[in-house]
Image (spheres, rainbow, N blue to C red):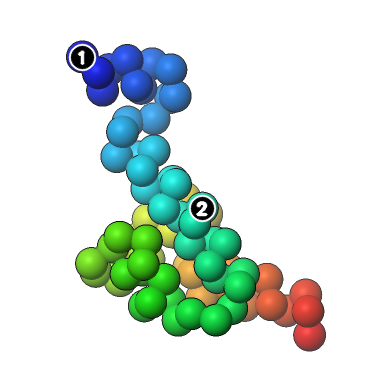
Amino acid sequence: HISHMFKKYTGDSVMSYIHKLRIRYAIRLLKQGDMSIQEISEKIGYNNVNNFYKYFKKITGETPALYSQKFWAHYL
């Protein structure tokens, strides 16, 4: 019942919402530029970097590496 109510008010399942929060945090860490993608993946709770890539791409439309490259290209 709780998950049904959560989806009704947020539009996302609980897990989908958690993945989005994790990816938002990953984006902040990527923009800092002082951690590897593997380190970020572990820090935000993904035990498998492939899962991190999968959800990052699903949510942002880009891989973490491409997202990071585009962000840092603006500063070069």
The residue located at (55%, 81%) in the rendering is 34
**Can you say whether 61 is above or below 5 in the image?**
below
Residue 61: image x %, image y %?
52, 56
Residue 37 is left or right of residue 67, and the answer is left
Residue 68 is left or right of residue 1, and the answer is right
Mark 1, secondary structure of its residue: loop
Looking at the picture, tell me which residue is in the foreground, 33 or 73.
Answer: 33
Residue 9 visible in the displayed image: yes
The residue located at (41%, 71%) in the rendering is 40
Residue 65: image x %, image y %?
51, 76
Q: Which mark is residue 35?
A: none
Residue 36: image x %, image y %?
45, 81
Q: Amino acid at mark 1?
A: His
The residue located at (43%, 59%) in the rendering is 56
Mark 2, secondary structure of its residue: helix
Q: Residues within 10 Å of mark 1 (few under 14, many from 20)?
A: few
**Can you say whether 33 is above or below 55 in the image?**
below
Q: Amino acid at mark 2?
A: Arg
Looking at the picture, tell me which residue is in the foreground, 35 or 67.
Answer: 35
Looking at the picture, tell me which residue is in the foreground, 18 or 73.
Answer: 18
Residue 35: image x %, image y %?
48, 80
Among numbered discs 2 and 1, the one appearing first in the sequence: 1
Residue 63 is left or right of residue 3, and the answer is right
**Quick one: quadrant of the N terminus?**
top left
The residue located at (38%, 16%) in the rendering is 8
Answer with the quarter of the image where residue 47 lies.
bottom left
Are the two marked residues, 2 and 1, in contact with CB atoms closer than 8 angstroms? no
Query: What residue is shown with label 1?
Result: 1
**Can you say whether 26 is above or below 13 in the image?**
below
Query: What residue is shown with label 2?
Result: 24
Looking at the picture, tell me which residue is in the foreground, 60 or 41.
Answer: 41
